[in-house]
């Protein structure tokens, strides 16, 4: 399972999202890839002010805040896939 966190420097919601993902990573053993949306204009235009954006196995699951209960459900479901 690969989780991508699209974020930007100075974003407190992005920091919160990464902290939550790292906490769940200890239980579920997934890989976290962090992508800075400000690293190129195409990503910046795509994600704008929606960061953090979290994808799980390529599918967008969260924009803005991560709902911990929903994240736990998604992680449990993806471990059985």
Image (cartoon, grey):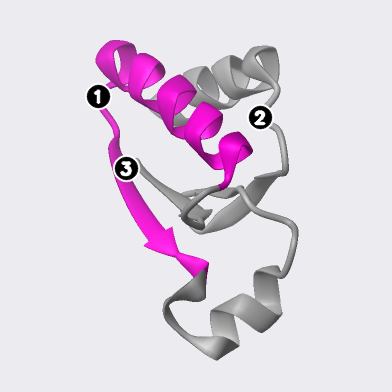
Label 2 neighbourhood size at 10 Å, few (<14), some (14-19), many (20+)? Answer: many
Position of residue 24 relative to residue 18, above or below, is above
Q: Which residue is mark 1?
A: 29
The image shows residue 48 at horizontal and vertical percentages of 72, 70
Q: Horizontal placement of 1 versus 50: left or right? A: left
Residue 49, magenta (yes or no): no
Figure check: 69 above or below 2: above
Determine which of the numbered discs, if any, sits on residue 43 in the image: none
In the rendered image, the quadrant that contains the N terminus is top left
User: SS for tag 1?
Assistant: loop
Residue lying furthest bottom? 41
Residue 30 image position (x, y, % from top left): 29, 32
Disc 1 to disc 2, how far (Cα)? 18 Å
Locate residue 74 relative to residue 34 in the image: left or right: right
Q: Residue at x 67, y 68 (%)?
A: 47
Q: CA distance from mark 2 to mark 3?
A: 15 Å
- Which residue is located at x 36 percent, y 53 percent? 34
Residue 24 colored in magenta in the image: yes
Earlier-in-chain disc, 1 versus 2: 1
Prevailing SS of the magenta stretch? helix
Q: Nearer the viewer, mark 1 or mark 3?
A: 3
What stretch of residues is rendered in magenta?
Answer: 11-37
Image coords of residue 29 (percent x, y): 24, 24
Instruction: Give the SS element for disc 3.
Output: strand
Q: Are marks 2 and 3 in contact (CB under 8 Å)?
A: no
Residue 32's disc number:
3
Which residue is labeled 2 in the image? 66
């Amino acid at each position: 399972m690969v989780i991508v966190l699209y974020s930007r420097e100075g974003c407190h919601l992005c920091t919160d999202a990464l902290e939550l993902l790292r906490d769940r990573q200890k239980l579920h053993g997934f890989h976290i890839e962090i992508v800075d949306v400000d690293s190129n204009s195409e990503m910046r235009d795509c994600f704008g002010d929606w960061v953090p954006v979290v994808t799980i196995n390529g599918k967008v699951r969260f924009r803005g805040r991560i709902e911990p209960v929903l994240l736990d459900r998604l992680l449990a479901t993806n471990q059985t896939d």
